[in-house]
C-alpha cells in the first residue's frame, strides 16, 4: 500500500490518552484527544471513541482502524497485559463490537500499528523483514516479516519489553521477573532514581539531570540503553530483521539512540542490526491502524 491512498479514520487508545483522527491522502489532518478512561469496560470505551469520531465527521461504514494498548488476538479479542492499566478489559470482543457499531473497522495492538506504519511509510521502507521498538513509559514493539505484520494467535508477538534481561533484577508489571521493561522503560528510570533518593523525578527529569552532568542520572540512562541494545541483539538472533527502528519518548530522547548503538557495537557482529530512529511520531499508530489488513 502507498501512503497517498490512505484515507479514513483512525483511533489510538493507549494507557494514557485516547486519540481519534481523520486521515486524508496518508496525512493526519484533524484529531481529537482526551485522557484514557482506565476503569471503563468495552462498551464505555466504544462510547468515548464514538463521541470523538462524531466530532471528526465519521459516518456509518466509513473506513476505520483502531489501535489499542494490550493484546489483540487473531480473533479480535482484547485484553490488558498489565491489569492495572485497563482492569475491565479481559477477552473483550473488540473487533466484533467495532464492526457492529461502526461498520467497516479493523483493530490491532498500538505498537504493531506503529510498526506497520514505519515499515511501509517510515524508517523501515524497503525492508521485507523489519522490527520496531517503542521505548516509553513501557516497552513494546512489533514485527513485519516478509512484508506482513506479525500478530500471533493471542496478540503477544512483538511485546519485546517482556523478554527477560540480564540487566534487570526487579519484577515487571506483566508478572514476569527481570524483564527489559523493568530496567529500561520510563517507569523503571523514575523508579531507579527514587531508589537512589531522588524522589518525585520523572524519566524526563532524569534525562535533564544527566544532561546537566549528574553522574547518577547518566548511569541510569546508560543502563537503560544497555538493556535495549541487548534486546536488539536478541531480536536479531530470533528473527534477523534487516533493520530495527526505535521510537517512543525515551527511545527518541536526545543521545539515547547513540548510547544504544555504542552498546550494540560491543555485541558480536552477527547480532548487530542497523538501528534507525522512528520517523512518524504520534502519527504512526494512527496511520498503521488504518493501514492494518482487515
Image (spheres, helix red, strand yellow):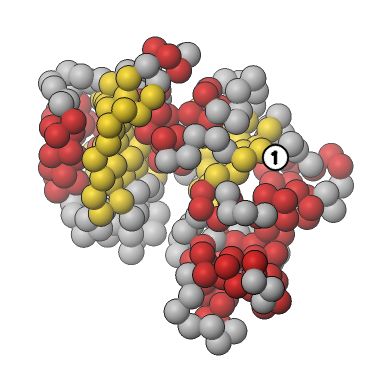
Residue 287 in view in this figure:
yes
Quarter of the image containing the C terminus?
top left
Left or right, 271 with reference to 33: right
For the residue carrying disc 1, how many other residues have a C-alpha within 10 Å: few (<14), some (14-19), or many (20+)?
Answer: many
Q: Residue furthest front?
A: 212
Tell me: residue 1, above or below residue 166: above
For the residue pair 146 and 16, the one nearer the viewer reads as: 16
The quarter of the displayed image where residue 237 is located: top right
User: What SS does tag 1 mark?
Assistant: strand
The quarter of the displayed image where residue 211 is located: bottom right
Residue 98 position, x and y percent, is: 21, 31
For the residue pair 72 and 255, the one nearer the viewer reads as: 255
Q: How many marks?
A: 1
- Which residue is painted at 33% across and 59% down in the image? 85
Residue 14 position, x and y percent, is: 34, 49
Residue 244 position, x and y percent, is: 65, 37
Query: Can you identify the residue that label 1 sits on?
Result: 275
- Which residue is painted at 48% across and 70% down in the image? 202
Residue 238 in view in this figure:
no
- Which residue is painted at 54% across and 61% down in the image? 185
Left or right, 20 with reference to 254: left
Tell me: residue 287, above or below residue 36: above
- Which residue is painted at 40% across and 54% down in the image? 81
Tell me: residue 140, above or below residue 27: below
Residue 60 position, x and y percent, is: 13, 21
Q: Residue furthest bottom?
A: 197
The quarter of the displayed image where residue 16 is located: bottom left
Left or right, 101 with reference to 161: left
Amino acid at each position: 500500500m502507498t501512503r497517498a491512498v490512505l484515507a479514513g479514520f483512525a483511533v489510538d487508545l493507549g494507557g494514557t490518552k485516547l486519540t481519534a483522527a481523520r486521515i486524508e491522502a496518508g496525512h493526519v489532518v484533524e484529531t481529537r484527544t482526551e485522557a484514557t478512561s482506565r476503569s471503563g469496560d468495552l462498551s464505555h470505551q466504544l462510547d468515548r471513541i464514538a463521541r470523538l469520531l462524531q466530532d471528526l465527521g465519521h459516518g456509518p461504514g466509513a473506513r476505520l482502524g483502531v489501535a489499542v494498548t494490550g493484546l489483540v488476538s487473531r480473533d479480535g479479542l482484547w485484553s490488558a497485559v498489565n491489569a492495572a492499566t485497563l482492569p475491565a478489559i479481559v477477552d473483550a470482543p473488540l473487533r466484533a463490537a467495532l464492526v457492529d457499531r461502526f461498520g467497516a473497522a479493523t483493530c490491532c495492538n498500538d505498537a504493531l500499528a506503529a510498526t506497520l506504519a514505519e515499515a511501509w511509510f517510515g524508517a523501515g521502507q524497503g525492508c521485507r523483514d523489519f522490527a520496531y521498538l517503542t521505548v516509553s513509559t513501557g516497552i513494546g514493539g512489533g514485527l513485519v516479516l516478509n512484508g506482513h505484520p506479525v500478530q500471533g494467535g493471542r496478540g503477544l508477538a512483538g511485546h519485546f519489553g517482556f523478554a527477560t534481561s540480564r540487566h534487570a533484577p526487579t519484577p515487571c508489571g506483566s508478572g514476569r521477573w527481570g524483564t527489559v521493561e523493568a530496567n529500561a522503560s520510563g517507569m523503571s528510570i523514575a523508579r531507579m532514581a527514587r531508589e537512589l533518593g531522588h524522589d518525585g523525578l520523572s524519566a524526563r527529569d532524569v534525562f535533564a539531570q544527566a544532561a546537566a552532568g549528574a553522574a547518577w542520572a547518566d548511569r541510569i540512562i546508560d543502563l537503560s540503553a544497555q538493556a535495549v541494545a541487548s534486546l536488539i541483539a536478541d531480536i536479531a538472533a530470533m528473527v534477523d530483521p534487516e533493520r530495527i527502528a526505535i521510537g517512543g519518548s525515551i527511545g527518541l530522547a536526545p543521545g539515547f539512540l547513540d548510547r544504544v548503538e555504542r552498546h550494540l557495537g560491543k555485541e558480536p557482529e552477527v547480532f548487530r542490526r542497523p538501528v534507525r530512529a522512528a520517523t512518524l511520531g504520534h502519527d504512526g499508530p494512527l496511520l498503521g491502524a488504518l493501514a492494518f489488513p482487515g
